[in-house]
Amino acid sequence: MVIAATPDISFLIPAYNAADTLAECLASLQQQSRSNWQAVVVDDGSTDRTWEVLEGIAKTDSRILPARQPNAGAAAARNHAARLAAAPLLCMLDADDWLDPTFIESMLPVAEDASPAVIAYCAFRRVAPDGRLMQVEQPPILTGDVAKREFSSFCALAIHTVVFPRSLFELLGGMDETLQTCEDWDLWLRMAFAGAEFRRVDQCLAFYRMKADSLSGDPIKMVRDAIRVTTKAQALQMQQGLSAEGPETGWITPPVSQLRMLAWVIAAKCDPTLDIAALAALLPEMPDAAGYENFLAGVILHGLQTGLSTDRADDLIDVLDKWRPTVLLLIQLIQKHSLPGTARKIIDAASWHISAANPLRSFTLGNVQVVSVALETLSRIPKAEPADTLIMHALSGGQHVGSFVGPFWGDLSIRAQIRLIMHEMQAEEHLQMPPTLVYISSWTREALRGYRAFGGLIIRNGQRRGRLERILVRIGRKALLACVPSDKQDNDARLSDMLQNLQGGLAPRFRNPTRLRPDEKKGAAPVQSEEEYWEHIFERPDPWNYVSVYEQVKYAQTLSLIPEGIEKALELACAEGIFTEKLARKVGRVTATDISQRAIDRAVERCRDHRNVELRVLDFVKSDVPPEQDLIVCSEVLYYMKDEEMLGAVCQKMAAAVKPNGYLITAHAHIRRDEPNRTGFDWDNPFGVGTIKQLLAAQPELSLEETIDTELYAIHRFRKGPVADPVLRVERHGTPLDADVANHIIWGPAGTERGAAWTTEVTTSVPILMYHRIAEEGPAALQRFRTPPEIFRKQLQFLRRQGFYTVTAQTLAGLLRSGKPIQGRPVMLTFDDAYSDFLEDAFPILAENDFSADVFVVTDKVGGRSDWDSAYGEPAPLMAWSHIQELHQKGISFGSHLASHTPASAMDNEALLAEAMRSRNALQSRLGSSVESIALPYGSTDFRVPGILALAGYGIGFTTRPAKAAFSDNLFGLPRLEVRGDRPLEAFPELMGLPGAYIG
């Protein structure tokens, strides 16, 4: 008789007709390395010898406490056991399962009856009905809100792998006895939302016996109870403000969680007689599964492996005929309620997972055909119907040497297989080159065709060895393909015919001349002196647009600081006399000077009607400033001094030239380099108005009398003599701002200069931001895809302030292909669909913040409306070709969004190839330049799409997968970060990896 000590842990064991397994279960406790445990076993109305077996064991071990109740279900039996438990920690163990001997020893030090409660959990293994141990199932790490997120979607822990405080169990009212299944999931969910801390023990310490008659094998009860638990989870989320949902957040909506259970149950049951539609009808809502394809493929395969007791994914190939019909029916059901193409992507993911487990196996699942080829024994492989996607694994000597994933057009002749091995897998070194007369003849013929390349290598110097090797490889490839037979029905021949037919129906490639980008300007002649520099600046009249609203408001503010009664005034750096003309009306006489003769000539013409104006050329840095002035005006020029020493000398000159009690007025911009903690211009000048003011104030004769300060510049009036307290007027600058002015402004507090980031930072990833509309109004259901203009402006100002610069699709492709770290802080801005508001609202804001963008055009819909959104309200207007061409001339890049806005995964191979080619051709013929980029509608891509896009002539493609683009990404599947219009402004810095940074 084993005598019980005060237990540290109590095991709650419901037993219903468990006579055959209960002894083994309790023996696993008796074999524990720690003996201070209690087992409360409740016979739940068994009709076999369970009670007799229990009584017999309990008589020999007082740690085992037997109890009985009428049959009420496992949850009620566990609650009954908990009321009898004596230990502070509990674990629930079913009567047919067992534990590793070190279970208590490993788990007790981790679990704590504390505040908050600490729950320990471990890995487990299923045991097949034939006694085979299945793979270890490792639970996820459940720290923080992850536990709430995971339990809101599924039962992340097996019931007997968890040790928890009895006090928490009692606080939560125990298990929900109205649930016949999922009662453990429900308990873990409530514990997580009660604030319990879950700690994983990285060991496999529990074993779960799989039984055909288990309640967890009842599809209807499993789906019904899962609906109840996930509905409760949603209510708990709302109570705690954890309502963010979607693939990108990790939080899954209740409908998707319920679909998850449905898919798992159907796959695990794998019963051809099961009425899948009737089971699906239990769901309150059948969700759109787009975005969850990989996730659901994993759920389905786990269910299959569980139900069929297979240890490896590739074992499913041996029983393919048993499960394929059921799974394909399930996937078809999911497709009926999802974005077109969703089913294809689920099949892609499932096929790849099975194939990756063993590349030696060949099989076909739906539209995917997986083939394994030994390079030593290549033979023709027929194309299965309805396969249009190929996964091909090549092996040499039993070793995997490469894989190809892409579109499938026809039978795989030996020639087609060799081409894939050489060109797609880059594995030609594993091919055995045939030493036959045919091959030698082919090699010689190909070499003679390339004799000019050989000759060039002989004549020219340089890296000849590497180039020669590349030529020889190319010749060898062509020679090998030339000597291998092919036929008109093979993959390559059918594709060639298709391409020829499609290209024949396209318009000429370029109808318009290639644009000249705004930055492609003729270079200026080298400047030899200050005078020549300024003469060059004034080659174009009014180079700074002094007639703009911004400049005119600045002039008016300057004039408002001029006291009455000024007789003699001097204007330094008068440019073309626009302000001089205004000044002449305020004072008796004006002498206006500038370093440029061109500028003075234009000023003379402008001021010819003003007899009180004298204009002349003067370099006031090198020459004396005319003395005895009642007023000197010197604006927008002092930051051209090369250093503070030169500036100080000029300030001294000006101060000396002012009469006693005379005035000096200056207007200069706030420059970011000079005042980094406030809004200012990003000019490279050594200083701005901040330093200029300080050096003028340092002149002993001058006193600051009055200031007009705006966000972008300040105007100061100094008096040569004593003054009372200086006056500060804070005023607004003129608007709107010209783009050439606005795009040099960095708004807000301190950030990171582009130049500084360029010289000090490198990155291996690029954020590609995805926008749709820039607009205030639109259907409420589409708010996610609509960013208000003022919010967009703040987002771009944030990017500018943080030192980001834009890259185009073409530039990004080159950067990613290079594999070299990228300097500075690159960002790519993309806009899908080419809405009219891009021209009206987005482009001006982009221009004023010195950013460019890539716009993806639905080419068949140009000039029309976004009819794909018609179910949500009035479709938004799209840009016309004339708008697109206008923006193209201004530096905006354009790519394809296909022709019809149909998901790529919803089209067959030929239809997708034809539409991709047609869309690219339309853009190229309208824009007069090459188009290489495409963003896939809805981000819809699959295993075929990259290969088809490459055949259509594209070089880079974008999806909606949420991540930064990295060197490891497929160039036709680059991820993008969606900028959602239904998120607060503060979410943008976090999206950019700068949480908490100021955004305005």
Image (spheres, rainbow, N blue to C red):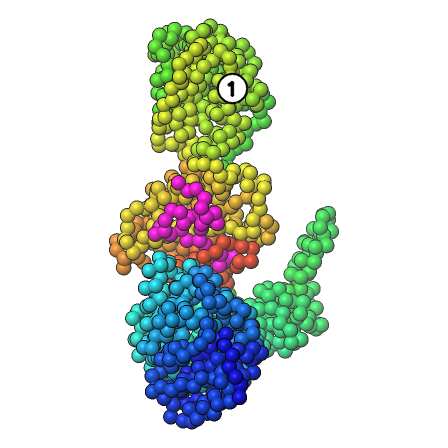
318 horizontally vs 586: left or right: right
Q: Does 92 appear above or below 556?
A: below
- Where does residue 333 sit, x and y in percent of width and height? 35, 74
Amino acid type at mark 1: Leu
How many numbered marks are there? 1
**Quadrant into which the C terminus falls:** top left
Q: Nearer the viewer, residue 399 or 692?
A: 692
- Where does residue 106 sit, x and y in percent of width and height? 56, 72
Q: Nearer the viewer, residue 344 or 482?
A: 344
Q: Nearer the viewer, residue 230 or 514?
A: 230
**Residue 925 visible in the shown view:** no
- Hey, which quadrant is residue 325 in on the image? bottom left
- Where does residue 194 sit, x and y in percent of width and height? 39, 64
Q: Which residue is mark 1?
A: 695
- The question of residue 988 being in magenta is answered with yes
Q: Main secondary structure of the magenta part?
A: loop
> Tag 1: Cα neighbours inside 10 Å, few (<14), some, or many (≥20)?
some
595 horizontally vs 840: left or right: right
Q: Secondary structure at mark 1?
A: helix
- Where does residue 449 sit, x and y in percent of width and height? 65, 59
Task: Give the residues drawn in magenta, as a range.
Answer: 971-1000
At a point 67% along the width and 67% down the height, the residue shown is: 429
**Residue 519 visible in the shown view:** yes
At a point 47% along the width and 53% down the height, the residue shown is: 933
466 horizontally vs 514: left or right: right
- Hey, which quadrant is residue 543 in on the image? top left
210 horizontally vs 470: left or right: left
- The question of residue 972 being in magenta is answered with yes
At a point 56% along the width and 58% down the height, the residue shown is: 968
